[in-house]
Amino acid sequence: MPALLEATHISQNFALSGGKSIAIFQDISLTVQEHEIVALVGPSGCGKSTLLRILIGLQRPSAGEVKYRGKPMTSVNPAAALVFQNFALFPWLTVEQNIALSLESRALADGERSRRVREAIDHVGLGGFEEAYPKELSGGMKQRVGIARALVVQPEILCLDEPFSALDVLTAETLRNEVIDLYTGKSSPVNSILMVTHSVEEAAFMASRIVVLGSPPAEIRAILENPLSYPRDEYHPEFLKLSRKLHALLSQALIGEDEPEKAATTDQSLVACAVPNVTLSAVMGLLEILENEKGTIDLVELGEKVDKPFTETLLVVSAAELLGWVTTSGQQVQLTAEGRKVLAADVQTRKQLLNAQLRRFRIFDLILRMLNQSESHEVDEEVVVSQLAITYPHEAPRQLFRTVVNWGRYAGLFRYSSTRKTLYSRDRIELLPR
Amino acid sequence: MIGPRLSPPPGRIFGLVDLCVLLALAAGIYGIVTVARQWSGVLQPVAEIHLQSRFLPVYMLYSVTRGIIAYGISFLFTMIYGYAAARIKGADRIMLPILDILQSIPVLGFLPGFVVGLVHLFPHRNLGLEMSSVLMIFTGQVWNMVFAFYASLKSVPEDLAAVAQLSNLSWWQRFFRLDLSFAANSLVWNSMMSMAGGWFFLTVSEAFVLGKHDFRLPGVGSYMSVAIEQGNLRAQWQGILAMMAIIVSLDQLVWRPLVAWSKKFSAEEIEQHEGSDSWLLNVIQRSQLLRGLRWIGDQLRHVRKHASGTGPRSPDRIWNGEVVRWIKRITIALFGAAVIYGLLKYVHLLRDIGATEWKAIFVSALLTFGRVMAAVALASIWTVPAGVAIGRNPRWARALQPIIQILASFPAPMVFPFAVGMMLLLGIGLGVGSIVLLLLGTQWYILFNVIAGVARIPPELWEVARLNRLSWRQRWQKLILPGIFPSLLIGWMTAAGGAWNASIVAEYIRFKGQMLATTGLGAFISQATDEGKFHLLAAAVTVMALAVVSFNRLVWRPLSVLAQSRFQFSP
């Protein structure tokens, strides 16, 4: 029997100005079987949401094919419904009208129509709010409307795009359980759920199969089965094991396993890779936490401490590692001597230390050389961005540029004017000998 | 909407409100009959205007009807043009510049085309003349509505569009539920502005001279122009009062309720326009009669839904077929041919213009340009401080906003005679005096926007200014001027655009039986129309359009970019 959804060799490119394009993800094949919850997990910006939109036919892939029950799809999949991260409710329609919108184009008897709306409202516990407008509702209630609007079409495949990340922790917890109840409930029309999330716990708690995506250009890093029965116990040993494994897989996808040449402070060669998209204050915050924890911390524990998506935490750790301030081995993060020195220093000394560190990065070396080559010690933003696009073909060049400017400004390596859109420095900059 | 929710009106059968509704209905029917009689009557190029006050109600009826029909055409045009520009791929590259140029052409530039065409189409009935008057009003209304609708369509949130697509809404359903609803708020506000823009040239649109022919249609505008020509002060005051009555009642009976109703389409979480409450909307919502009508409407819709029961259709499939591609090509070819033909005719028309005439046009353009700039600068001198003072005080703002709105809607040319009379007494000529006249019409736009801009400055910044004991001067330099800059800029752009157009009535005035004129592009255009010199009219209108468009491109646009990148308060 053909799978409910089957995607084969999907690729998606994003066009840049100047006729170039970068790959967001390449050659992704995955299936959604009947009666399962599939979660796509990956770092933010890896194109999970785009992949989801391709899978339900809202967007066409640059290459590859999506089949629904063995038939190739050409437009929106009628068996799918989508719940959005930011709810996507029509502000001028009441709760009831928002939910009924999905049925408007269907030829249904009026009795049937209102019965289904009624049912969907009861399913998510929105009774009494029928006449309310979205602006009168809290975030949790808004998302309940979003879920009801998806349920009312009795979808075979319910798609959730980071459905709980705009909600506070408690509300998210409640809604997660409600969605599980919907899925396991006998009366529910929902056959399978396909969800996108950046939260490891959410995936482990909800999904029966977890697809781990790497950083851009994304590819499938691993697919984990999660046979635990619902409702799941977050302290069950199997749950913890799975969650650890997921953390490890994601860390691997993001920081990579033991690459000592990246962090070695004594090495004279330049650090080749680009800089992760995090702020230096976040990196400093990490060092402070490590100091409180006597110098080492488990990655998972760290993730819980900072209450940020795990993937973002990983980026901060990888930045600190690149700077030589921490080392990682397996799941352990450890503060280095260099890191302690930075912590002990005052603001000015920190800047100097950072300044020295950044000169060891190829990316900053490149920019400093460009500045030195110019008579006036000025380089246009566009020139730098296109250079970055060539040197780091797998990174989004504008985002990389913003990060580089943030770091470089902080370290006093160079200055940047947003009105003139140029990088500049007062005078020639001493470079590391090559 | 799920089935009919309203039960048939229970309880009280008939109330005072319902009586009013019925009376209004009867009056409406009488009005329609009267207007129809005038429109289908035998062509009367110069209607006799009676200055006695008892004739005014009928004149008001005629003028309002013209304004409303013109608005209807504007709305249709907005829907079609705005939708095409926003949704046909690549269309906005051609359609927006065209709109930009059309917007900069003063009403007299359209006049000969409309009159010659339509009067010849209906040589024996008033219909043609009436239609050309309506179309002239239309040219004063339509442009900002199109721009607003286009901008709304372009900013429909992606997620909502995805919902519409997933719900498989048909083209119409998507248009009403999403596109039109999303645009509703800005459409209503711009419609209000448009109506005011249409009234501005009412005196011109209802009474004009074209070469040897004099045209006059019965209405408040022509009443005013006759009163001004004869120097009849009492009649002038009556005309002004009549115009006021039209504006205030449209505001109370149409715009207030619409604004209050359109609040529900606001995508913003916080209510923005305070005090946009409408007594009329409340009354209507309470009216048993209208509730009953609504109930009947719901029933009808219900029936229709059952009768049709069509399945969903994807607009993509209809629009991207081979047939459509051909239709597109043929349309473009036809359009291209028409443009080339028009251009040839146009060049032919301009060939007769000599060097001295071109020189006169350019000198006039420079003078008018100076006046426009001077009017904007002078208006800013008082409106910026006043606007800041009003905007800082919510109670004043609430009380004054409706009054300013009405003052802004009032067509300034109707009070020109008073200003001119005063200036003549003071010995000021029209050369300088026309600056004051331009100012009368356009200052309100700046005031408006300054008030709105002040409200947009976050209160925390005022607190910072107070905590740091910023001096009066520092406060203006560091906080107020940069803070209101984006809004002030919009005010300036609207005011300057309006001033260019208004120059045709400010530089060339019939006053107590004599002609007052000064050198300027507006006067040039008016005179060319009066004397029926169409080649000069075409040339002068072209120069004005070029001047406006290039000033927009070279000055206003870079400033807007600056305002958006540096002076916007992030949400």
Image: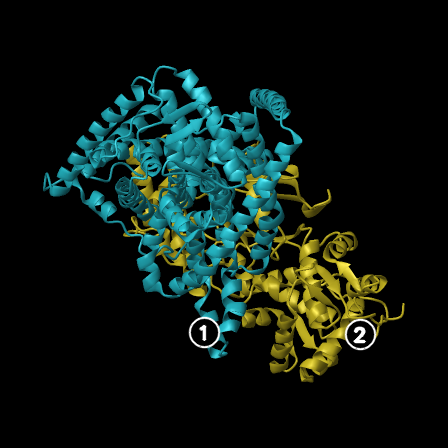
Q: Residue at x 62, y 28 (%)?
A: B353
Look at label 2 and name its amino acid: Thr
Residue B306 to residue B508: above or below: above
Q: Circle 2 is placed at which residue position?
A: A265
Secondary structure category for the residue under label 1: helix
Given residues B25 and B366, the one toward you in this image is B366
Given residues B515 and A182, the one toward you in this image is B515
Residue extending farthest to the top is B124
Q: Circle 1 is placed at which residue position?
A: B463
Quarter of the rendering occupied by the N terminus of chain B? top left
What letter labels the chain drawn in cyan? B
Provide residue A136's location: percent of width, then percent of height.
34, 56
Provide residue A414's location: percent of width, then percent of height.
75, 68
The image quadrant that residue B65 belongs to is top left
Tag 2, which chain? A
Secondary structure category for the residue under label 2: loop
**Numbered mark located on residue B382 in the image:** none
Q: Is residue A81 visible?
A: no
* In this picture, residue B89 sits left or right of residue A123: right
* In this picture, residue B225 sits left or right of residue B32: right
Given residues A86 and B219, the one toward you in this image is B219
Provide residue A117's location: percent of width, then percent of height.
33, 42
Q: Nearer the viewer, mark 2 or mark 1?
A: 1
Look at label 1 and name its amino acid: Glu
What letter labels the chain drawn in yellow? A
Q: Is residue B405 visible?
A: yes
* In this picture, residue A11 sits left or right of residue B121: right
